[in-house]
Image (cartoon, grey):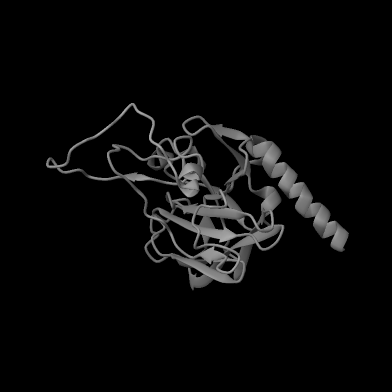
Amino acid sequence: MGALVLFAAFLLAATAVHVAGQEGFLSIDCGLDAALSGRLNTDTQITYVSDGPYVDGGENHEIGDVRSAGDYTDLRTLRSFPSGLRNCYTLPTVSGAKYLVRTQVFYGNYDGKNDSSSVQFELYLGTNFWDKVENVSYWPSEAVFVAWASWVPVCLINTGNGAPFVNTVELRQLGPSLYPDVNTDQFMCLCTYDRRNLGATSFTRFPNDRYDRFWWSVSTSSSWAYLSTQNTIAQQDQALQEST
């Protein structure tokens, strides 16, 4: 049995690297038909795979209003879990490596009820509470952690307030010097980062951020000065070098 589990973990890891096409990336489009696995997001150049190899149970759905997702094709499908208290995705990791894990929840009237106001559920990373999803019209959740095994479960917990669901599950391996407070002694940061990109006019992620972190633009003031340079900016700190 032990050999079988190790083989399964190895197979998932190999599949993630080969199919996703991004070093250190695993990008899961939940509910995506297996025949479309390996779909390229032409805006981000990130390849998304179907969630079939990573989860058992649940139901695949397409959102009811495709236009509401705009150009974010990875939000147009989802997997819901109307049965079971705890349903988990099994993500391949390298023990001791540091990761960012992110889920995106986007309702899009997938159930035809046009009412998501009462839907709430919880996210766990392994046995550790991660986040409470309270606004399913759109809810991104992030955590940074150090992997403790060759696979990590991301779990949706039914709290009795509607069926949990998820549109994307994304795993990004980080440089070891990033987020130094997250280490083998404090292996997890249970947080969602609200990153702001001063001077930007639009949302930013990969490929502008090589770790695919989300950055939102900031409303500027007329009293602010816009500065730019063509010169190389020296970065002495290793963590800063890894972050760019």
Taking the spot 54% from the left edge, 65% from the top edge, the residue there is: 188
- How many badges with numbers are in the image? 0
103 left or right, relative to 232 = right
Q: Quadrant of the N terminus?
A: bottom right
Q: Position of residue 214 (x, y in %)?
A: 42, 46
30 left or right, relative to 215 = right
Q: Is residue 202 visible?
A: yes
Foreground pick, 29 / 19:
19
Q: Position of residue 43 (x, y in %)?
A: 46, 31
Q: Position of residue 58 (x, y in %)?
A: 62, 57
Foreground pick, 103 / 239:
239
Q: Is residue 76 visible?
A: no
Taking the spot 63% from the left edge, 43% from the top edge, the residue there is: 50
Task: Identify the image quadrant of residue 15.
Answer: top right
Q: Position of residue 37 (x, y in %)?
A: 64, 38
Foreground pick, 221 / 152:
221
